[in-house]
Image (cartoon, helix red, strand yellow):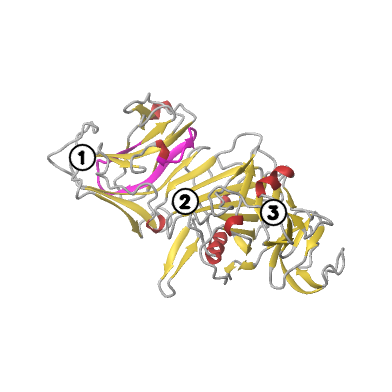
Amino acid sequence: MKFSFCCGCGMVLWLCCAQAFAASTETDSPYQGVTHHHIVTTAPRLVDIHIVEIDPTAAGIDFFVSPSNGSSPGETNHQTTSGFVTQHNLQIGLNANFTAYAPSAPYMDVLGIAASNGDVYSPFYAGWPGINITQNNQVNMVQAVAGNISHDPPDYYSGYAPNPNVPLYNAVGGNEHIVHNGQNIATWADGLHPRSAMGVTAAGHLLLFAVDGRNTGHSLGMSTSEVADVLIGYGAVEAMNLDGGGSTTLVFSDPAPRLVNVPVGVSNVPGTERNVGCNFGVYAAVHAQPQASRYVFADFEQADQGLFTQSPGYSGSTQGINEAASTSAAVQGIAHSGQWSQRLQIVNDPAAGSDQNPSGGWFVRHLSGSNANRTQNHARPSSGYIGFWAMTSDAGVSVALALDDTNNVTADRSTRKTLIADGQWHLYEWNLEDDDLWEAWVSGNGAIDTPDFTLDSLQFFGPHANATIYIDDLMHFSGGSLLPEPTAAVLAGISVGSLLFRRP
């Protein structure tokens, strides 16, 4: 995800443009035809976002909306999203329409259009949009327009009809149309909150969106305009805002239903789930084989350095440099992708050396987190490749990675690679499954041989000379090499346009 600041209007714009990923992003395929992006960034504020892209033509994909409660008061009985997923054996669930009690729990009035398997049980609101999925899984944004429905059932809630006038089969409604023809048209000024939304891509794929909020230290929420910009970056040509706040809940069943986001459903307490009047669900087929995933530890966009905020001299393991003069900073205008990278300026201390550097000179342990332990870092499966892009014009510098595995702390380090001193970006990567590329460090055994790992640090080795090093796009891909971008061992069922690197 890319961000920019509009000086003329004083608004922060969330722009997901040619290459859309944030300070950290994980992309995987939990089901056939389903891509899940989990995005965490601190710029312009801390937010935790989930985007689910669904190909309605994929094998096993089908949809379902909370059904009517029949002759009971209101239109539905309230239910948590995880309860909805459980009851109907769904794989994905997202809260949907705004609702109101009718007159009290558990009976709910659903606000805006709602239909479940062809039963249209809630009418349009004037000016409120909807997303409808026909019986043959065609996804459309629909608008309430004056007129009568021309197909069965005729004259339903006379006065409003869907435009386009398609059969309403599984439909939910939102209170605001936020993306139209690929443009941000959001106008609702309702502050920063948890948000749920749905969108449609040019290819007819469905986008489900959830961002957490009201949760200091985890996620602070977004405006509907910001949600629109994020969805546009992930291909939305049409999108609408759904009920948010404490209702925002995304659930996967794999196989047991679990909360994917962190809702604040009851009294704004994180991790609690609210009963809502309308949920949207997806049936999907599991993969026959485990699927690869791609994780971006840091891309440094908008000066967001993720966990790499410490100076080169912060670690007690660093040796041979002038710690006060050596710096790390996010810089704009120099990048492998996007607009930002991190610059390390290493100032040599000619009177010192390092026992970590067999060639003499200095050693820098650039930490992931303030103390690099497993509790601060994201655990990743011990397969595939880990690497990053680097650029320098200073000769004699080499680099390695240190990983913490399940059984040890600060255990294993990769073999060193020499940075090419030509002022160009180059990828430096290591195969986690090749024991020849790993050596024992501290308490390690020289192999990444436990189910998962966390990243301890980037480690740089240099001669008795100053060096300037740029780093960008630190990533792990569990399916294979990070090159070519992004098609090496492409994630099964995920199109190139759905991966982290998004081309216009």
**Amino acid at circle 2:** His
- The one of 230 and 332 positioned closer to us in this rendering: 230
**Residue indicated by mark 2:** 218
One can see residue 500 in this view? no
Residue highlighted by disc 1: 463
Q: Earlier in the sequence, mark 3 or mark 2?
A: 2
Q: List the residue tagged with mark 3.
A: 279
Tell me the SS state at disc 1. loop
Q: Residue at x 24, y 33 (%)?
A: 357
Q: Residue at x 37, y 37 (%)?
A: 373
Local packing at callout 3 (Cα closer than 10 Å; few below 14, some 14-19, many 20+) is many
Q: Amino acid at mark 1?
A: Pro
Say whether marks 3 and 2 touch (CB < 8 Å). no
Residue lying at 54% horizontally and 66% vertically, measured from the top left: 225
Amino acid at pointer 3:
Asn
Q: Residue furthest left?
A: 351
Compare residues 76 and 483 and report the one nearer the observer.
76
Is label 2 in a helix, a strand or a loop? loop
Read off the magenta span.
Answer: 376-401
Q: Earlier in the sequence, mark 1 or mark 2?
A: 2
Distance of label 1 from label 2 (alpha carbons): 41 Å
Mark 1 closeness class: few <14, some 14–19, many ≥20 residues within 10 Å: many
**Mark 3 falls on what kind of element?**
strand
Task: Give how far apart the Cα atoms at labels 3 and 2 are.
Answer: 25 Å
